[in-house]
Every structure is written in C-alpha cells, then in structure tokens.
C-alpha cells in the first residue's frame, strides 16, 4: 500500500517536471507591441513573462553608491536580446521589434 502511494507520488512529480520543462517562452513582435512606455515591471512580466536576467544600477558612474532607480530586464529570444530599462518603476522606452531570421 505505501509502496503504491510512493510510486504514485513519484510519477506525479515526474509528470510535473516534464510538463514544466516542455514549456518554452516564445516572445513575438505582437507581444512586444503591447509593451508601452511607463509600464511597471510587473505589467511587462504579465505580457512577456519573467526576464532571463536583471540588473539594478546602484551608482551613476561617479563611483558613489546611491539609488539611481534604474532596473534593466534582459530577455533572450532566438539569439536576439531584448533590453527593457525601467527608471523609478516605469519603463522609459518601448522595445524594438525582433528581426526576422
């Protein structure tokens, strides 16, 4: 009885892992066109998903640490990089469309 429960739990866990690894994010130009200036990072994530990486700038180039309010999201799609820069929680420039291969 316990062995069957363990086996069932293991198979369910394996199924979840397979489903999650099979989900690949695809960013299309129609998605990028929905991203508008002044959007918050959360609004952008709702459209594009989680970024592949982020960078928070803590200095303005003069060597002194201070909060500049800059946050950059990086998305990678088919060898292209989408860079979105937020200042004080708002997108400062709309993204460029992806190039066709």
Image (cartoon, rainbow, N blue to C red):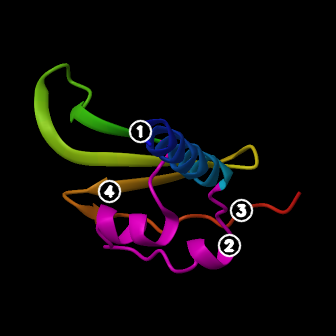
* Residues tagged 3 and 2 counted as in contact (Cβ below 8 A): yes
- Crowding around mark 1 (Cα neighbors within 10 Å: few <14, some 14 to 19, many 20+) is few
Identify the residue at horizontal 51%, vertical 80% (top origin).
34
> Circle 4 is placed at which residue position?
86
> Circle 1 is placed at which residue position?
2
Identify the residue at horizontal 12%, vertical 39% (top origin).
67
Count of marks overlaid on the render: 4
> Circle 3 is placed at which residue position?
98
Identify the residue at the far right of this view: 101
Does 68 appear above or below 97? Answer: above
What percent of the width, then of the height, locates residue 43? 34, 72
Task: Give the prevailing secondary structure in the magenta stretch.
Answer: loop
Left or right side of 27 for 41: left
What percent of the width, then of the height, locates residue 8? 52, 47
> Which circle marks residue 29 in the picture?
2
**Magenta region: which residues?**
23-52
């Amino acid at each position: 009885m316990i062995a069957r429960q363990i086996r069932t739990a293991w198979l369910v866990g394996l199924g979840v892992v397979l489903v999650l690894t099979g989900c690949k994010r695809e960013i299309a130009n129609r998605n990028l066109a929905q991203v508008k200036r002044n959007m918050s990072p959360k609004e952008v994530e709702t459209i594009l998903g989680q970024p592949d990486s982020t960078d928070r700038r803590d200095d303005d180039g003069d060597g002194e640490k201070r909060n500049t309010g800059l946050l950059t999201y990086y998305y990678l799609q088919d060898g292209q990089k989408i860079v979105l820069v937020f200042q004080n929680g708002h997108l400062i420039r709309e993204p460029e469309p992806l190039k066709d291969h």
